């Protein structure tokens, strides 16, 4: 008996072609449309968009002569994705809800519904590829970038597990977007000319300040400009803080806090002390390369007001409405404690760049669990810190304090809350984690 494949049919052209290809291959295919969001507050589209998507999905299923199912996962979506998103913004970080949507909804809650329907696999319209390695210990699932470099969506699947990948299929991963459109046209699928969805997964394009005001109250704060000429002295001051902590090699044993980020040297009570590992010189070198600058208001000049740190993100240049500059001003740092935003003029302002970042020890996620790094190990990978960013050469360092990623070249706009994802040179995605600092 052929395995049953449940296609997550969204009404878009990608999932439609995924279903079409599986049907053409003679697979036992059924479609399921999921509704994940009802509230239209802050959205920039009509309140019936999901209904239109469902109608198109039904038309595609009818065209392909496959059963159509509907499931409402809005409660799960709010709990697993939207609440997380609000919490991250409130904490001054910039979340990526699409990553959580895939790991917690499409390949978790939706997968469970598919299994209840007797499904053996879930197929989606993601532009990525899956391979299976067979060994004496069993099957290992590899997830690789899609063939279309302009549409590769592997980044959004960076938190999937081996168990989830065992049930996942990506029928269009070896195709380009133009090829997918052409297949849809030839097959006369109702979604052939439908525009791609944009914005937050299942929510759509939003007016972010209005959307966030559902849960986060605006609180006026100051915008402080950091001038390029003052940056070297500020950075030197912050580096000296780190070095002073490094000179105290007994900070772990004495339970003193490290100067960096006000964290204890043995963050999260990991094995640093248990292994008689002091705050080593190497760890502090990594901290120096990865730690963000902690500005004070006295470091610059107050040039305006804002409506609250949660409404802004590092690297942003729109939305502050502050003039009087020859070039654009960009957000280089935020401080939730004082509700202050720090900005710099010009896209090459030194405050926008860093050589490294840190992922908390317990927040590392290894898709290839067999390749997880041991404490003290370093390894070279290709890394991206946001969707569609070109892959960057970097070295990963696994320490008891966390995972450090040090880039060959300084990176612009490293943003806490976003996901850093690492790949092998042949395009296999190995692991990921939210940027902590």
Image (tube, rainbow, N blue to C red):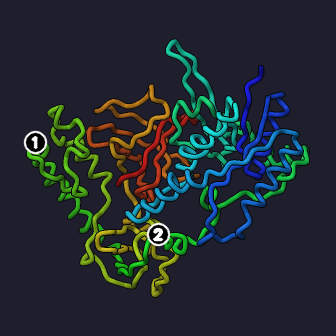
Name of the residue lying farthest toward the top: 136
| Element on which disc 1 rests | loop
The C terminus appears in which quarter of the rendering? bottom left
CA distance for labels 2 and 1: 41 Å
Q: Which residue is mark 2?
A: 215
Name the residue located 41 percent from the left edge and 30 percent from the top edge: 372
Q: How would you rate the neighbour count of disc 1 (Cα within 10 Å): few for under 14, some for 14-19, many for 20 or more?
A: some
Answer with the quarter of the image where residue 89 lies.
bottom left
Q: Which residue is mark 1?
A: 253
As drawn, is 64 to the left or to the right of 317? Answer: right
As drawn, is 66 to the left or to the right of 267? Answer: right
Residue 172 x %, y %: 73, 39
Name the residue located 79 percent from the left edge and 48 percent from the top edge: 178
Judge whether 291 appears above or below 29 on screen.
below
Depth check, front residue: 216 or 132: 216
Judge whether 300 appears above or below 150 on screen.
below
The N terminus appears in which quarter of the rendering? top right
């Amino acid at each position: 008996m052929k395995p049953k494949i449940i296609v997550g049919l969204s009404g878009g052209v990608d999932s439609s072609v995924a279903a079409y290809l599986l049907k053409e291959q003679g697979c036992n295919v059924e479609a399921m449309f999921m509704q994940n969001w009802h509230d239209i507050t802050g959205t920039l589209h009509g309140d019936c968009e999901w209904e239109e998507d469902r109608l198109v999905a039904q038309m595609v299923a009818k065209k392909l002569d496959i059963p159509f199912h509907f499931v409402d996962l809005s409660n799960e979506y709010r709990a697993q994705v939207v609440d997380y998103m609000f919490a991250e913004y409130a904490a001054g970080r910039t979340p990526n809800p699409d990553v959580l949507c895939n790991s917690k909804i499409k390949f978790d809650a939706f997968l469970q519904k598919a299994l209840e329907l007797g499904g053996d696999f879930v197929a989606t319209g993601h532009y990525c590829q899956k391979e299976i390695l067979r060994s004496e210990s069993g099957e290992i699932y590899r997830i690789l970038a899609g063939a279309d470099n302009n549409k590769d969506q592997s980044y959004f699947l960076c938190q999937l597990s081996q168990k989830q990948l065992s049930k996942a299929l990506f029928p269009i991963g070896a195709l380009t977007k133009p090829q997918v459109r052409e297949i849809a046209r030839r097959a006369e699928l109702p979604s052939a000319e439908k525009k791609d969805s944009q914005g937050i997964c299942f929510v759509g394009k939003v007016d972010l300040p209005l959307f966030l005001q559902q849960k986060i109250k605006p609180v006026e704060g100051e915008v402080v400009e950091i001038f390029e000429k003052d940056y070297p002295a500020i950075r030197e001051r912050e580096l000296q803080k780190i070095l002073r902590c490094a000179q105290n090699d007994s900070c772990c044993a004495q339970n003193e806090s490290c100067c960096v980020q006000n964290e204890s040297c043995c963050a999260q009570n990991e094995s640093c002390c248990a292994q008689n590992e002091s705050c080593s010189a190497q760890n502090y070198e990594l901290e120096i390369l990865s730690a963000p600058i902690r500005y004070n208001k006295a470091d610059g000049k107050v040039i305006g007001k804002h409506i609250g740190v949660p409404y802004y993100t590092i690297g942003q240049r729109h939305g502050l409405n502050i003039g009087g500059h020859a070039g654009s001003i960009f957000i280089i740092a935020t401080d939730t404690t004082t509700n202050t935003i720090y900005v710099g003029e010009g896209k090459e302002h030194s405050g926008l760049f860093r050589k490294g970042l840190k992922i908390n020890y317990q927040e590392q996620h290894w898709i290839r669990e067999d390749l997880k790094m041991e404490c003290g190990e370093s390894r070279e990978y290709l890394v991206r810190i946001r969707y569609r960013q070109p892959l960057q050469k970097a070295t990963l360092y696994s320490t008891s304090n966390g995972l450090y990623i040090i880039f060959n070249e300084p990176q612009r706009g490293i943003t806490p809350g976003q996901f850093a994802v690492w790949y092998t040179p042949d395009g296999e995605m190995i692991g990921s984690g939210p940027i902590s600092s």
